[in-house]
Image (cartoon, rainbow, N blue to C red):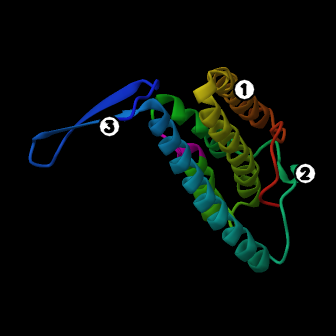
Amino acid sequence: MTAVSCAPLVRVTVNSASGAPFQTESSFLAMVNLLAFASLLTLIGVLMYSRHLQTTSTIESGGVSASAADRSPEMSHGRSIALNLSPLLIFIGMPMVHLLVPLWVFKATRQQNPVLAADAKHLLNFEITWTLFVIVGLLLSVVLVGLLILTALLIFHLVVTLQAAFSISKGRTPRFPLSLTFLK
């Protein structure tokens, strides 16, 4: 006896290393659950690694942190602006780069440039929060309300990212609304 499902099927064809096509079918629900699970695993890995970096960074720097007062108007803002615009790469098909770029910048600059490291930390907190919201939206997409939530989240992400880059270009500290604090 075969199982009957109302969920639409997704047919995927992949060419193997030998060139022979490999074709498989799975339900839309299974693909959404797989994407949500992969996003959650990446999120957990980034969060654990960034917490480890934060602990070692605080110990090495003696607890000194960067604040808005450290941001001088003469300072080149190019790196901070590029950092805050990097999450937009997900719109051209580069998944998880919105988490990996701020994590890499935080790791690479935590001793040399505390202002850039602080920007990366704030951006990473926002991106982790946004990814959690997207996972919830993916899981709710089975009930079609998730598609509305995902659309609203994408627009919100685009606006906040551009607003943060604009704030940095004006010499102000960017604000990330609805951001949970995972890294202090």
Q: Is residue 85 visible?
A: no
- Give residue 80's position: percent from left, percent from top: 68, 44
- Give residue 142's position: percent from left, percent from top: 58, 28
Q: Which mark is residue 69?
A: 2
Q: Amino acid at mark 1?
A: Phe
Q: Amino acid at mark 3?
A: Met
Per the image, label 1 sits on a secondary structure element best described as helix
| Residue 63 left/right relative to 48 | right
Per the image, label 2 sits on a secondary structure element best described as helix
Q: Nearer the viewer, residue 101 or 79?
A: 101
Q: Name the residue furthest right.
A: 69
For the C terminus, give its image quadrant.
bottom right
Report the residue at 84% width, 64% height from top: 65
**Mark 1 or 3 closer to N-term?**
3
Disc 1 residue crowd, few under 14, some 14–19, many 20+, Cα 10 Å = few
Q: CA distance from mark 2 to mark 1?
A: 28 Å
Q: Image height check: is 96 above or below 183? A: above
Magenta-colored segment: predominant secondary structure: loop
The stretch of residues the image draws in magenta is 94-98
Q: CA distance from mark 1 to mark 3?
A: 46 Å
Q: Nearer the viewer, residue 160 or 133?
A: 133
Report the residue at 71% width, 60% height from top: 113
- Give residue 10's position: percent from left, percent from top: 36, 28
Q: Is residue 156 magenta?
A: no
| Mark 1, residue position | 156
Q: Amino acid at mark 2?
A: Ala
Q: Image height check: is 19 above or below 148? A: below
Please identify the quarter of the rendering in which residue 111 is found. Answer: bottom right
**Mark 2 or 3 closer to N-term?**
3
Disc 2 residue crowd, few under 14, some 14–19, many 20+, Cα 10 Å = few
| Mark 3, residue position | 1
